[in-house]
Image (tube, rainbow, N blue to C red):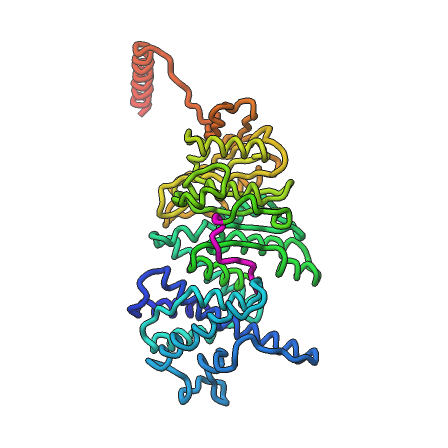
Amino acid sequence: MYKEAFKNIDNVLWKDAGCSSELDYVEQTSWILFLKYLDDYEDEKETAAILNGETYKRIIDKQFIWKEWAYPKTSEGKLNYDIALTGDDLLEFVNKELFPHLAGFKQSAENPRSIDYKIGEIFSELRNKLQSGYAIREVINKVNDLKFLSNKEKLELSSLYEDKIKNMGNAGRNGGEYYTPRPLIKSIVKVINPQIGETVYDGAVGSAGFLCEAFDWMSKSKELNAAEYQQLQNNTFYGKEKKSLAYVIGVMNMILHGVEAPNIIHTNTLAENLADIQQKDRVDVILANPPFGGKERSEIQQNFPVKTSESAYLFLQHFIKIMKSGGRSGVVMKNTFLSNVDNASISLRKQLLEECNLYSILSMPKGTFIGTPVQTVVLFFEKGKPTEKIWYYELNVGRNLGKINPLNNQDLGDFVQRAFEKEVSKNSWFVNIEEINRETWDLTVNNPNNIEKIDNRRPDDIISEIEQLEEKAAQALQKIKEIL
């Protein structure tokens, strides 16, 4: 049912002049979904309060509650067409009353980590792009059928929402920066293995794929008691995101995965001076795919010891700094980071190897990230002791990856299985730190098992062998003829 509803919503959005891309579809679906979720969330809280003999005060004023403006019902529980807004009336209400009211929560909320603040942040950053009030009415009617009350319902919705994010990533343009292939995220989380009681952080959160997967992994790791559940809800997952649309998608994605008020802050992580990070700010686990190729301004670069305009390099410095001693990271980087000879690359590799134990490097094949030729590696490292040896794994899936043949969980199965014991195989090997050039600190992936056998024979010898083989073939053919 939900899959059909999502498809129908996209059909409505496609017809509206204000929506022209997959990014628009996700954005416009997100704000309407969020308000329906919020209504179900508040219904649940209100029911629990009544059962406990308490009073629950709703976050949103009465006239802006979903049941009042979006889907007022008759006594039979159907849409009350007599009072339900539509057309220009609905469009004007959404743009001039609903959005300004909800955006105001950003100023009135006492705690930036509260759901009140998230509401204000979301509706301060988004705008309604639908140009037809009739289209808004159609989308609302379809979203109203979606329920967020049971875990099963949330699971189905989260899966469909992930599909929308994936489609946005596959659409190219700016969409790809929000989407990291989920099989890769799942594998990184498995290898890092975050535990309840640890804090998990992504400073370039995007659609929050890493935090969502870590939440799923940790919540299923054991039977949770009430304290552990609250720990996961409130004091485990932290993220920062610079871009407005990604911020909204990330918050919505985490909500659909079961985190009621995600601790995602809308900010530019790189604008923070590394010198200002204190012990209380540090985290146990970092899972991230920072943006590559961004050209950061000189004033941003001043926040970092290693000056560079490459945003991924600045993020890596941030991650090393904000991680606790003994903390561990799984971070996606362009594979050129391993071999670039500019001063920033060399300095950063040296810092990584001296301050952290870079215990594994996973090399990904071309086509892992759909729509871009960029090849990537995943760096697995632990802070607090220098690197002694690195276990490399070169992923070879045996086919060309792309939109038709994307990366899947089976492709990474062998890597995950071998990663814990760091087994040597045709795709994996060790490099000791003594083997690394101390001037360039080059970490290039060079699989020693891929060395082709070189034929050192003279041309005359090769020709002679060919003639002998041809003679043997002729003799064999003659015997067959005699038998027949």
Q: Can residue 445 be seen in the rendering of this structure?
A: no
- Position of residue 284 relative to residue 347, above or below, is below
- Position of residue 46 relative to residue 360, above or below, is below
Residue 99 x %, y %: 43, 72
Q: Is residue 227 magenta?
A: no
Residue 467 x %, y %: 30, 14
Q: Quadrant of residue 22?
A: bottom left
In the image, taking residue 377 as reference, residue 402 lies left or right, namely left
Q: Residue at x 70, y 81 (%)?
A: 53
Residue 44 x %, y %: 60, 74
Q: Residue at x 32, y 65 (%)?
A: 19
Q: Quadrant of the C terminus?
A: top left
Residue 454 x %, y %: 39, 18
The residue nearer to you, when weighing 482 against 38, is 38
Q: Which residues are magenta?
A: 261-271
In the image, taking residue 2 as reference, residue 215 lies left or right, namely right
Q: Is residue 262 magenta?
A: yes
- Position of residue 115 relative to residue 401, above or below, is below
